[in-house]
Image (cartoon, rainbow, N blue to C red):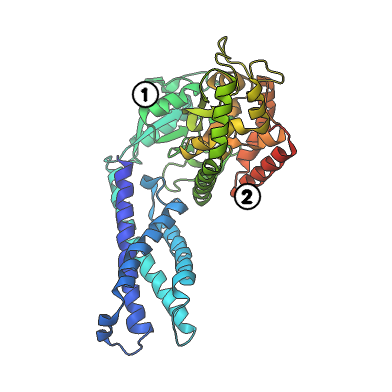
């Protein structure tokens, strides 16, 4: 199962469909709308430059729109009804954009021509797009039923419910494509009935390792409703991209997130939609991150030079400080800062900064007070390791301590860490683990209410507080 190849198939078919649709629409405008009496000799007078620009650029517009809408996510999970609905909605939205950007200036005899051209473009775009999409989807579903495409599946739970769902899915014909790798035992489990059928892959804290090691595509939560106290911890360890999470019926009252029935006639399972942001907002957030950070790096270039000279003249050691932090999905990266402490400041082990910290250099106090020491974080954003807004990244040393007190902290790893956050704005810097757990409630509040608007508000208040001189 190669996801990249599958996406490429849809990309190529979508591009070619848009190319053919626009070419036919272009001819329709010239031969029918602009010349009610067909005169095919007019084809010789068509501006070939505009024609070829259209069949190259317009398909690119459509493919970009499909990507922003999230169509190419979960590419093996497509179904025909959902395909038709989603394709029509995007086609309608895209035609409206093209109409007001490219077609509104057309010379027409009356307004009925606008309705005709818009309707024809919508029909051509939708029909030429949906036919190959349905064909690809039907081929994929057939391959899943024949076990030519399989999804590595992990079961969370090991009791009676887990055994029942395993037996039902494993014996189902035609198959749903589940290839069971093993199971994860939950804390409340008293019996390990699934041991006879599948190997144990560890406890809840071993979920990330099991997912990465076995390239898991689907997770099924199969615990009894009486074990609902395990749900909070289970959800804390989930949220990986491109992984489908399902649960057995009976857990809908204790599960968080948007839930829908995956199969009415087949095995009843509830699918948990752990998408925090709509895909178009996620794409917009990435765009804003890149543009803003790119501009910031250019604007701060003179400041970077000033800082480099100041650090070199006032203390020994490198200009930049690189420290390993934990980012999205538990992946580690090196955060970049201007060095504000003396070298070997943590020779006795990790230690959080506090007021009147003697490890901070005189020039470092200025850097920290003005927050200039963190401006290299924009480079981390350009690398895709951080975002402008998101919970501040922590070191694994402190994360291990936090999750003992607040296991839900792991939910923050579903999103990219940020340069600023609601926790930073409302709480400020944490000087110990207890304060980190107090700040957590603001970061959780942000994650539950993520949006472009929320990000812009947090950025605004961050800048406001910096100008007021408050430490954020």
Q: Is residue 442 left or right of residue 132?
A: right
Picture coordinates of residue 346, whole percent (x, y): 57, 14
Front residue of 291/392: it is 291
Question: Mark on residue 453?
Answer: 2
Q: Position of residue 271 (x, y in %)?
A: 49, 42
Question: From the viewer's perspective, is residue 197 above or below residue 5?
Answer: above
Looking at the rendered structure, which numbered label has been put on residue 197? 1
Indicate the position of residue 460 as horizontal and vertical percent values: 67, 45
The residue shown at (36%, 41%) is 176
Q: Residue at x 39, y 32 (%)?
A: 216
- Give SS at disc 1: loop
Instruction: Please give the count of numbered marks on the rendered protein.
Output: 2
What is the C-alpha distance between the residues marked 1 and 2? 49 Å
Tag 1: Cα neighbours inside 10 Å, few (<14), some, or many (≥20)?
few
Disc marking residue 235: none
Looking at the image, which residue is at 33% across and 53% down?
11
Q: Is disc 1 in contact with disc 2, using a CB cutoff of under 8 Å?
A: no
Please name which of the two marks, 1 or 2, marks the residue nearer to the observer: 2
Viewer-nearest residue: 121 or 344? 344
Identify whether 279 is placed above or below 240. Answer: below
Q: Secondary structure at mark 2?
A: helix
Outermost residue on the top side: it is 348
Across and down, in percent, residue 224 comes to 54, 29
């Amino acid at each position: 199962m190669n996801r990249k190849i599958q996406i490429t198939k849809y990309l190529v078919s979508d591009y070619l469909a848009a190319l053919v649709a626009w070419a036919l629409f272009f001819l329709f405008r010239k031969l029918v709308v602009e010349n009610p009496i067909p005169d095919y000799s007019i084809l010789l007078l068509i501006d070939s430059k505009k024609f070829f620009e259209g069949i190259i650029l317009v398909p690119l517009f459509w493919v970009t729109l499909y990507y922003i809408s999230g169509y190419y996510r979960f590419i093996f999970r497509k179904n025909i009804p959902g395909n038709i609905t989603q394709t029509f909605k995007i086609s309608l939205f895209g035609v409206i954009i093209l109409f007001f950007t490219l077609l509104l200036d057309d010379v027409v005899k009356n307004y009925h021509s606008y309705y005709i051209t818009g309707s024809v473009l919508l029909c051509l775009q939708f029909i030429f797009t949906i036919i190959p999409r349905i064909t690809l989807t039907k081929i994929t579903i057939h391959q899943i039923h024949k076990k030519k495409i399989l999804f590595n599946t992990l079961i969370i739970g090991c009791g009676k419910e887990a055994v029942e769902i395993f037996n039902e899915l494993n014996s189902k014909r035609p198959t749903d494509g589940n290839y069971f790798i093993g199971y994860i035992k939950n804390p409340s489990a008293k019996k390990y009935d699934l041991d006879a059928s599948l190997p144990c892959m560890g406890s809840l804290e071993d979920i990330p390792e099991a997912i990465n090691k076995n390239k898991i595509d689907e997770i099924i939560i199969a615990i009894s409703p009486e074990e609902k106290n395990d749900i909070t911890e289970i959800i804390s360890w989930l949220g990986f991209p491109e992984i489908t999470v399902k649960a057995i019926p009976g857990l809908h009252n204790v599960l968080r997130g948007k839930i829908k029935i995956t199969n009415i006639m087949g095995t009843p399972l509830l699918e948990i939609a752990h998408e925090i942001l709509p895909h178009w907002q996620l794409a917009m957030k990435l765009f804003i991150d890149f543009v803003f950070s790119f501009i910031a790096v250019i604007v701060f270039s003179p400041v970077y030079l000033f800082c480099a000279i100041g650090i070199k003249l006032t203390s020994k050691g490198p200009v930049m400080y690189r420290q390993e932090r934990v980012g999205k999905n538990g992946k580690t990266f090196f955060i970049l800062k201007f060095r504000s402490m003396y070298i070997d400041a943590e020779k006795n082990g990790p230690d959080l900064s506090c007021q009147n910290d003697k490890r901070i250099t005189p020039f470092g106090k200025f850097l920290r007070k003005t927050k200039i020491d963190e401006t290299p974080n924009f480079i981390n954003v350009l690398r895709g390791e951080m975002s402008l807004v998101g919970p501040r990244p922590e070191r694994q040393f402190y994360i291990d301590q936090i999750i003992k007190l607040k296991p839900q902290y792991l939910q923050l790893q579903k999103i990219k860490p940020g340069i600023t956050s609601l926790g930073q704005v409302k709480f400020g810097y944490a000087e110990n683990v207890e304060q980190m757990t107090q700040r957590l409630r603001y970061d959780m509040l942000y994650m539950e209410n993520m949006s472009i608007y929320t990000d812009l508000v947090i950025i605004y208040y961050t800048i406001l507080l910096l100008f007021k001189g408050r430490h954020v």
